[in-house]
Image (cartoon, rainbow, N blue to C red):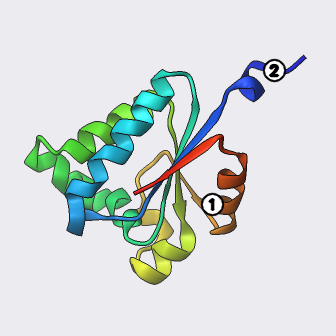
């Protein structure tokens, strides 16, 4: 008999944009929250400039300013059980960040994890 977690369809969203193009970062998390609420096993993978959105200092500043749709959708996605991943190569080489600068609840993984997640997913969206 297939377990409950195994029976769930997997859905992957890849985020490549960061704070420099903030309007392009809302929809991925909004879609992730919808997918999770539809009981899909939902993951979001941040790469290229996406890791900048996961910076503790950037998120703290965005929270202080208030009414940031990215922060609102990020929190909603986490509340809905969306799994969050960040590509360590993008984090270090493209965003020049350290692993300890990432907000809690995000798993730091290698680029090969994206291949695994894509192969396992029923559907994938790239933003």
Q: Which mark is residue 3?
A: 2
Looking at the rendering, which quadrant does residue 94 occupy?
A: bottom left
**Quarter of the figure with the N terminus:** top right
- Asked if residue 10 is positioned above or below residue 99 in the image, the reply reads above
Q: Quadrant of the C terminus?
A: bottom left
Q: Residue at x 50, y 22 (%)?
A: 38
Check disc 1 and report the residue beneath it.
Answer: 114
Crowd rating for badge 1 (residues with CA inside 10 Å; few <14, some 14–19, many 20+) = many
Foreground of the two, 12 or 97: 12
Mark nearer the N terminus (2 vs 1): 2
- Residue at the extreme left of the image, as rendered: 65
Q: Any mark on residue 30, and which? A: none
- Is residue 69 shown above or below 50? above
Residue 106: horizontal and vertical position, in percent? 50, 50
Q: Give the residue displayed 39% in from the left and 63% down from the top.
A: 50
- Where on the picture, by quarter, is residue 123? top right
Residue 35 appears left or right of 54 = right
Density class for disc 2 (Cα within 10 Å; few <14, some 14-19, many ≥20) is few
**Rendered view: 51 above or below 32:** below
Q: Can you give x and y, in whole percent of width and height, for residue 11 in the image?
A: 58, 40
Real-space CA distance between mark 2 and mark 1, rounded to the nearest whole angstrom? 24 Å
Q: Position of residue 41 (x, y in %)?
A: 60, 33
Circle 2: element type: loop
Say what secondary structure mark 1 lies in: helix
The residue under the point 50% across, 67% down is: 99
């Amino acid at each position: 008999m297939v377990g409950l977690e195994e029976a769930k369809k997997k859905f992957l969203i890849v985020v490549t944009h960061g704070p420099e193009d903030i309007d392009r970062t809302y929809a991925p998390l909004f879609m992730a929250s919808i997918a999770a609420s539809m009981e899909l096993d939902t993951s979001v993978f941040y790469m290229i400039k996406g890791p900048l959105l996961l910076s503790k200092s950037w998120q703290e500043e965005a929270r202080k300013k208030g009414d940031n749709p990215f922060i609102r959708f990020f929190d909603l996605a986490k509340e809905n059980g969306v799994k969050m991943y960040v590509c360590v190569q993008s984090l270090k080489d493209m965003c020049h960040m350290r692993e300890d600068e990432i907000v809690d609840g995000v798993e730091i993984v290698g680029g090969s994890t994206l291949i695994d997640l894509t192969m396992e997913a029923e559907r994938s969206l790239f933003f």
